[in-house]
Image (cartoon, rainbow, N blue to C red):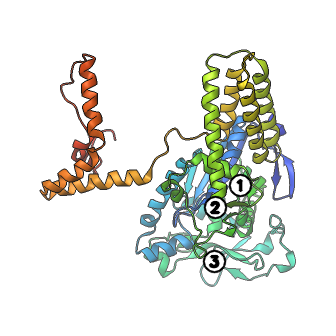
Amino acid sequence: MTAPAPSKLSLFNTLTRRVEPLAPLAPPRVTLYTCGPTVWNYAHIGNFRTFLFEDLLRRWLERSGYDVFHIMNLTDVDDRTIKAARQAGKQLTDHTAPFTKAFFEDRDYLRIKPAHVYTPATEYMPQMIALVSKLIERGVAYKGEDGSVYFAINKFPTYGRLSQLDKREIKVGARVASDEYAKGDPSDFALWKKADAEAEAVGAVWDAPFGRGRPGWHLECSAMSLDEIRKCCGVQTLDIHAGGIDLIFPHHENEIAQSEGATGQQFSRHWVHGEFLNVRGTKMSKRHGNFLTARDLREQGVDAAAVRLLFFQTHYRQPVDFTDDALEAAKEGVRRLGEFHARLTENGKRETGNGPLGELSRKLENDTAAALNDDLNAPRAVAALFDFVRAANRELDRPQRTGGAAAALGAFERVAGALFDILPTERAADPALERWVAERIAARAQARKSKDFKAARQAGKQLTDHTAPFTKAFFEDRDYLRIKPAHVYTPATEYMPQMIARRAPGARGRD
């Protein structure tokens, strides 16, 4: 795809409530900070709706010739993580580590490009403590009688600009210690929370000059993003800060106050926010029985391409409804794309030149660029992709053509593959089958350990009933073709103890 001029990309800026041309501080470099998951539990598909629009934004920026530096935070200490660790009877890091690992697995399943830097909050305590000290020094933060440190919002004249807060609602001197609170209750917010029994119990406390405690949620993103862009690029201003619409207040509003209160410089030039996701017409919640995680979809064997297509068919600033019908339609769309890709690949091997297919490919790339440069209008670009598929199929149906399939294949793969990444997985995993095999293998290993050889043979037979005839057929074909037998044949099912030992803690060698 021919990269469009960088200045053509326009995005809706929440700060100004206008669609504006992207204006990076030092083009072609773009610094992009995205609010990542709070790893108190598994990330749900509402989180991933946001992460997927951010993935498309990054891919389009890179395709447009920008040099993107992408930072994503991991909130591994806050009110929710501490409460969850306490309820689980674990130390904070022991509770959050499995969910951090699960997030990366879900990210890979959904084909989201990894950020260049991930910033777990617990690894940035010196930077957070330094930021609080600087805010106290500049007179915009103070230590309360309760031992916590607060940001004085009346000392920051532009507080409320991002969320369009009514200044008359600001309660001078009022304080709020919780991480999340309503827009109708703007108060001095906690930068550093004095250690309490719950935080001490799970190991979520750190020593600081202003008292033993832990950071407030909002402080974390400011400290980590400022530190990373300083190290990377020597600046104190982000080009793009992105996240879900629910983070505008208080989280992003407070990030601006903290960051600009410390540096005296604009914190981010562009603020980009994605809308909510509903499930079957209702806001997703466990109470409504419609709570879905990415791993739920993966365990159901849903191809990630279908999830991506479903989300990209709705503009990121519009709510999307995740329904069974919408998912089935997306699966059908992915199937059509896969069939077309196979057909075009076969024709592309022998058809060069230009012709009508070449013209169609140029139109696809121009239409895609026009749509995505217009506030990342993914649904318009996806519609152009399916228009291309229909028109190209008609051209391929013609008995005599003048070529162009190779050019069309290249354009199609750049849009449907590299950009949207909505081509079907070659072999979608079958989680139920994988569980069945794992259970049989475990049963056989346990039976052997218990010297119950009859049960071990039965478990092994369940695994080999299907494969045994094909193994026998392979040996017959080998002999027919006069292939010399190997000295040793190694059926995988007969080497499970060795494989298990290989993965045991402390096992040596390459995994």
Instruction: Determine the CA span between mark 3 and mark 1.
Output: 23 Å
Residue 131 visible here: yes
Q: Residues within 10 Å of mark 1 (few under 14, many from 20)?
A: many
Residue displayed at 27% across by 34% down: 471
Answer with mark 2 or mark 3, whichever residue precedes in sequence: 2
Given the image, on which type of amino acid does mark 1 rest?
Ala
- For residue 71, above or below residue 7: below
Q: Which quadrant of the figure has residue 386?
A: top right
Secondary structure beneath dot 1 equals strand
**In front: label 2 or label 3:** 2
> Residue 69: image x %, image y %?
65, 43
Residue 52 visible here: no
Task: Write down the residue under mark 2.
Answer: 46
Task: Write down the residue under mark 3.
Answer: 178
- For residue 465, above or below residue 489: below
Given the image, on which type of amino acid does mark 2 rest?
Gly
Task: Write down the residue under mark 1.
Answer: 242
Which mark is on residue 357? Answer: none
> Residue 365: image x %, image y %?
77, 32
The answer to the question of whether label 1 and label 2 lie on touching residues, with beta carbons closer than 8 A, is: no
